Image (cartoon, rainbow, N blue to C red):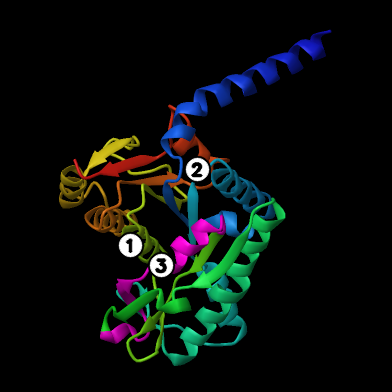
């Protein structure tokens, strides 16, 4: 009898959760949500499958999710196997001709297809792309001394909109094309921000390994404006690896994204918590 009571309680809680999610499901109907995926979850099969289910559910309830991924650890692993040495300038990898070939092979091949496979195995319809496909992401060199590291200057979202119309989930490797046909390695966050801006996305979700932007006491700040982010950077409260993420967020907002959320991708169902619950997850950044 006790076991049945517990089971009944679980089903009631599930039904209540679905009921409470209804306004959010209606709110995001046909909305574009760009998700930057990376970190530890990419190398963990259980976490990968959980992420894939979340993306499939988003598509199933009427959202248009776009996945943009990184793959730094996998790139490092392959470079080591091939005995290709990396040099760094101010913490950024110099990407020469040999290195960019490895980067493209790993990101557009191994990593991209693993994510596509995971989404499709959960009942979704995903297609793997890179920014080179249909000249989606045209780049200029980010800094000459970095070699083939690109900064997106033109993003054409027309192919993505065609995929939305067919209820297909795009999974994009952050590889861009130069004006003369060169291949460029693009930072994953930067690529996700540029693609989100081109789509005028309702949300850009930057999944990280931390809970969000923290104040000077170490507490996560759940709501931030552009002015507050700039003030926190100026005061050194936002520092280290969080600076480029918040800068990506501000650039995306300037490009027309409605809101950007920096959240902990290691939390199960983090995307669903952010989109479909009162609780939310991480730090949401808006213009005002």
Q: Residues within 10 Å of mark 2 (few under 14, many from 20)?
A: many
Q: Which residue is mark 3?
A: 158
Discs 1/3, front: 3
Q: Quadrant of the N terminus?
A: top right
| Quadrant in the picture for residue 2 | top right
Label placed on residue 198: 1
Tag 1's secondary structure? helix
- Which badge, 2 or 3, comes first in the chain's sequence? 3
Highlighted range, magenta? 144-168
Label 1 and label 3: CA atoms lie apart by 10 Å
Residue at x-position 51% and y-position 57%: 165
Tag 3's secondary structure? helix
Can residue 109 be seen here? yes
Can residue 38 be seen here? no
Tag 2's secondary structure? helix
Is residue 17 shown above or below 199?
above
66 vs 221, nearest the viewer: 66
Q: Quadrant of the C terminus?
A: top left
Q: Is residue 75 left or right of residue 258?
A: right
Is residue 149 within the magenta segment? Answer: yes
Q: Which residue is mark 2?
A: 271
| Quadrant in the picture for residue 119 | bottom right
- Which badge, 1 or 2, comes first in the chain's sequence? 1
Whether residues under marks 1 and 2 lie with C-beta atoms below 8 angstroms apart, the answer is no
Q: Is residue 99 left or right of residue 229?
A: right
Residue 35 drawn at (x, y percent):
46, 53
């Amino acid at each position: 009898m006790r076991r049945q009571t517990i089971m009944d309680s679980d089903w009631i809680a599930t039904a209540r959760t679905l009921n409470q999610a209804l306004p959010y499901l209606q709110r995001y109907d046909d909305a574009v949500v760009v998700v930057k995926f990376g970190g530890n979850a990419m190398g963990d099969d259980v976490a990968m499958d959980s992420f894939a289910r979340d993306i499939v559910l988003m598509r199933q309830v009427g959202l248009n999710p776009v996945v943009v991924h990184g793959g730094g650890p996998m790139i490092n692993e392959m470079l080591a196997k091939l005995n290709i040495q990396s040099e760094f300038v101010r913490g950024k990898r110099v990407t020469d001709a040999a290195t960019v070939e490895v980067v493209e092979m790993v990101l557009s091949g191994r990593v991209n297809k693993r994510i596509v496979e995971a989404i499709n195995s959960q009942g979704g319809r995903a297609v793997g792309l890179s920014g080179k496909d249909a000249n989606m992401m045209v780049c200029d060199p980010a800094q000459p001394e970095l070699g083939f590291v690109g900064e997106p200057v033109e993003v054409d979202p027309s192919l993505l909109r065609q995929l939305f119309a067919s209820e297909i989930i795009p999974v994009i490797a952050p590889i861009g094309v130069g004006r003369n046909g060169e291949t460029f390695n693009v930072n994953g966050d930067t690529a996700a921000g540029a693609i989100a801006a081109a789509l005028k996305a309702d949300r850009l979700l930057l999944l990280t390994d931390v809970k969000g932007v923290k104040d000077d006491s170490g507490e996560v700040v759940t709501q931030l404006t552009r002015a507050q982010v700039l003030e926190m950077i100026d005061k050194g409260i936002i520092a280290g690896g969080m600076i480029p993420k918040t800068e990506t967020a501000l650039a995306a907002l300037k490009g027309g994204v409605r809101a950007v959320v920096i959240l902990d991708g290691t939390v199960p169902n983090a995307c669903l918590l952010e989109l479909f619950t009162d609780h939310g997850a991480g730090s949401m950044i808006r213009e005002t």
